[in-house]
Amino acid sequence: MRELMNLNVDNLILQALREDITSEDITTNSVMPNYQLGQVELICKQDGIIAGLSVFQRVFELLDDKTEFDMKAKDGDEVKNGQLLGVIKGDIRVLLEGERTALNYLQRMSGIATYTHSIAVLLKGSKTKLLDTRKTTPNMRVFEKYAVKVGGGYNHRYNLSDGILLKDNHIGAAGGVKEAVAMAKEYAPFVRKIEVEVENLTMVKDAVEAGADIIMLDNMDKDTMKEAIKIIDGRAETECSGNVTKENVANLVDIGVDYISSGALTHSAPILDLSLKNLHAI
């Protein structure tokens, strides 16, 4: 995770810090005008899966690289209400300035990991893998998709440059499923898989005949999806999508698709309640 941060996310964290501190932290500077070494405890206030501890730490490191951490948990751990997750030591001004931004990242990422885990366990024992989507918070995608993996899910394409997914509007622009697949095959490097989103059995047949690598069954009822799987007959990988949540995913397991994708993993996961407490000088 540290390599990922150094290459990709330091600038994003700095933007978040600049959003919160445009010139100075007036409140902190009024009560702590000078350097004072102190420490604060990271406390869990809700059961869940922790994710984003390295990002949490990096917020304070970017404010002051002398900040020290004694972490009692690691990403992917199941954590409990009241559990001490770590002790952070450093300039009290830095601990106060970075508190909200660091917690925002950690709470959001841990909430996604927790929600993802709650769905992933429902698919355990089946061949079906749980995927995320591009329905992420702007400038938070790298953090949110990492959290999905920590929670036991898998990442779909990272962005528009990462894979070919012909959705309804692409198909409409091209003039049909077969036309869209043919154009994608002509344009894209041969190493790229081509996925097609289909909404009915006619589109399923067209996608198979066109040679799509992955066929996404979008917003179909269960019986239609089962019929679609029969038509595809192993000639393409299969994915189902459309309002998949913790409440209905168990009903989709026996369909036999290779993947289930859920935008809810990132757009609807509640945060995990965490707090920095007991700040004091040392």
Image (spheres, grey):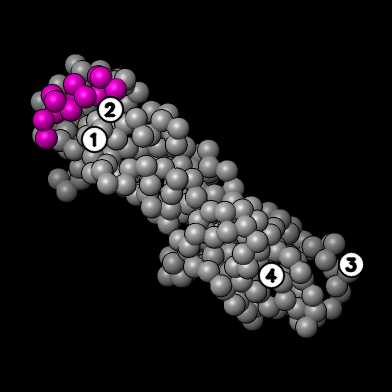
Amino acid type for the residue under numbered disc 2:
Leu
x then y, percent, for residue 11? 54, 61
The residue type indicated by label 4 comes to Glu
Find the magenta span and give its range. 222-234
Q: Is residue 136 visible?
A: no
Give the secondary structure at mark 4: strand
- Checking the image for residue 41, the label placed there is 4
Along the polypeptide, which appears first: circle 4 or circle 3?
3
- At mark 2, the secondary structure is strand
Residue at left offset 40%, top offset 37%: 262
- 3D distance between C-alphas at marks 3 and 2: 58 Å
Q: Is residue 252 visible?
A: yes
Could you say which disc has been placed on residue 30 in the image? 3
Q: Secondary structure at mark 1?
A: loop
Q: Is residue 273 magenta?
A: no
Residue denoted by label 2: 217
Which mark lies nearer to you, 4 or 3?
Answer: 4
Which mark is first along the chain, 2 or 1? 2
